[in-house]
């Protein structure tokens, strides 16, 4: 598939569903000039991965289709800097390392150009640390805290720990040490990405292209993002069908109001997959309520939902089925994964 | 000499002229139990070394006499974290490495147990950096800033850079990685030392003994310490006799008032040396003004000065002569040192 895409097609593929790209013209130039550019996404080893992670897995799939080398940084040290207790850090890393590849299996993505990198494998090297110290002299406490504010817990000046300031600086340096042309992340990382654009050139390195996708809401509360630390707001990658159904049952989803986590997941994950697979999204419904509904695109679902032609209850059950399908690879490995998960999150 | 000192004598030798010791009983135990304990003093590679450095050189001489292994950390990375520009860092290190050993030559100290360690030779190692990151998770921004406040430039929250917070944490870790039983420093380092006592045990290391000597005032202003960054407040290790005389001539020293940098240097350096060498301190004076004065101890000088029996002008010239004697080894190497100094401080 890669070879058949034009530069313009690659650009559109990368850009779709993004919220912002810093350096769009640089991206076009990169696609024109470099045979296999490198993109990296970092995920700090903290809470248990949840279905919100499919947003970035899908975008990384786009990068793979566009011919990129894709690196997923399993950022163990960043996890510790953001409150993961040091004694369980390696166990959590192991769990991430086991469960995240299954997301790509679930998406049916060709992963020959996907690489997993462990943070501590390169972030403790002398040249990395030298650059970190350099970066620390070019960055005010104020700017580092601001960069960390949407990412790190307790990033207010009164409660912050020194680790909260080192966290964004390491993420800045990572762009260089992973040999990345692009850093891709959720838009909550925006301030760190902006910091990276400022700081890397001061170290004599080039500023990287920054690509961001939107955050999706959790299942509870219309404003907060899906979060690993709020159990009821998220569906865990290990949740079984019964649990998924129960969580969706309890999820906020007011008839006619699309501002909720279920619609967000539909839009940013399920319907993207359906679109790529050229499949329809089906809502099963008893004949007496009008029978099954079939949708080609998110727009149509939204329209029906707003006009109350699609009831939250029916939607929830249809989404539960799709999520359950997505998590089949995890269910297949359930015993192994639960053992690993128990050691990581006691 | 070492072998003839009792534990009590060693203790008294280490304690003399100190302002504070954290862990006195631990120190007594150490002297009793360890054949050759290790003490370290760190000096960040920043401004040009001045005669105030003789205060700690003398105390390190005490440690050597008490049978210690003495390590002087020439802290190049700390220098950069405290505003030394990265491009001249190595040149400044070279200058420190050349000039500081001459202070010990000047004092006539046996240096077989004195070792110079370059910070970046061990502070960039993975295990060190891992511990630094660990320490950063155990230390609030607030506590790190407070620790740095008397040591690092611009350590106010509004202006501080991230490097200002990393600085004290590295000093904490240094105690462990230098294998030190004791950290010795000027009392301006007190808050970092207290932080070290708190943080090292959280990393599974033992808290070290902390020994502090007082700060001595500069030649200008009765309250500020002698500082490398205020030229008129200090006498540089490369100053020649004419320059020394001129600076002392201009130094604050009001008749009858002992609160000035000249009296402080007399007390903490010159008269300590005189005492150890069993020599007298001589103030040359014309016969018509009463002729030469000879002092065995600082107390007598102070008494005469307070009672205006010793005039500032006469005292200044006597002190100038002593300082010039102290700096003879530097004058002998002057050409080489000035070349190095010019490269380090352009």
Image: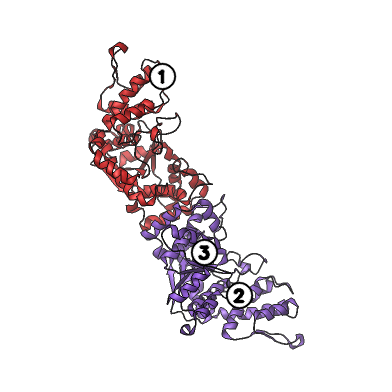
Chain colours: A red, B purple
Give residue A175's position: percent from left, percent from top. 37, 47
Which chain's residue wears label 3? B
In the picture of the structure, the residue carrying the numbered disc 1 is A255
Task: Give the residue drawn at x 46%, y 46%.
Answer: A198
> Mark number for residue B46?
3
Question: Can residue B147 be seen in the rendering of this structure?
Answer: yes
Question: Can residue B237 be seen in the rendering of this structure?
Answer: no
Task: Give the residue drawn at x 36%, y 43%.
Answer: A43
Give residue A106's position: percent from left, percent from top. 25, 34
- Rate crowding at label 2 as few (under 14), some (14 to 19) or many (20 or more) other CA atoms within 10 Å: many
**Horizontal relation, residue A3 to residue B334: left or right:** left
Give residue B241's position: percent from left, percent from top. 61, 78
Task: Give the residue drawn at x 47%, y 62%.
Answer: B171
Point out the image quarter for the N terminus of chain A. top left
In the picture of the structure, the residue carrying the numbered disc 2 is B268
- Rate crowding at label 3 as few (under 14), some (14 to 19) or many (20 or more) other CA atoms within 10 Å: many
Secondary element under disc 1, as helix, strand or loop, is: loop
Q: Which label's residue is closer to the chain start, 2 or 3?
A: 3
Which chain's residue wears label 2? B
Q: Residue furthest right?
A: B288
Task: Evaluate whether label 1 is on the same chain as label 2.
Answer: no
């Amino acid at each position: 598939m890669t070879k058949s895409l034009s530069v313009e097609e690659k650009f559109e593929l990368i850009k779709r569903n993004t919220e912002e790209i810093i350096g769009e013209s640089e991206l076009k130039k990169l696609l024109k000039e470099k045979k296999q550019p490198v993109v990296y996404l970092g995920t700090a080893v903290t809470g248990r991965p949840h279905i919100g992670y499919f947003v970035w897995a899908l975008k990384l799939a786009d990068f793979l289709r566009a011919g990129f080398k894709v690196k997923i940084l399993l950022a163990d040290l960043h996890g510790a800097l953001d409150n993961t207790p040091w004694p369980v850090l390696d166990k959590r890393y192991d769990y991430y390392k086991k469960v995240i590849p299954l997301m790509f299996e679930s998406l049916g993505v060709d992963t020959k150009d996907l690489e997993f990198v462990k943070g501590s494998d390169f972030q403790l090297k002398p040249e990395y640390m030298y650059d970190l110290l350099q970066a620390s002299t070019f960055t005010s406490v104020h700017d580092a805290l601001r960069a960390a504010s949407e990412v790190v817990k307790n990033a207010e000046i009164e409660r912050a720990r020194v680790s909260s300031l080192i966290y964004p600086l390491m993420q800045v340096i990572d762009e260089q040490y992973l040999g990345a042309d692009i850093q891709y992340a959720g838009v909550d990382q925006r301030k760190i990405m902006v910091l990276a654009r400022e700081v890397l050139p001061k170290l004599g390195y080039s500023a990287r292209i920054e690509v961001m996708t939107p955050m999706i809401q959790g299942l509870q509360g219309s404003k907060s993002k899906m979060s690993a630390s709020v159990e009821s707001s998220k569906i865990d990658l290990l949740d079984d069908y019964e649990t998924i159904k129960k969580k969706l049952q309890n999820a906020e989803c007011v008839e006619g109001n699309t501002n909720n986590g279920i619609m967000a997941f539909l839009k940013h994950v399920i319907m993207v997959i359906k679109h790529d697979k050229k499949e329809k999204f089906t809502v099963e419904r008893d004949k007496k309520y009008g029978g099954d509904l079939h949708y080609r695109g998110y727009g149509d679902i939204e329209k029906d939902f707003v006009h109350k032609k699609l009831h939250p209850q029916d939607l929830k059950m249809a989404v539960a089925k799709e999520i359950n399908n997505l998590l089949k690879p995890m269910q297949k490995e359930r015993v192994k994964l639960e053992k690993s998960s128990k050691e990581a999150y006691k």
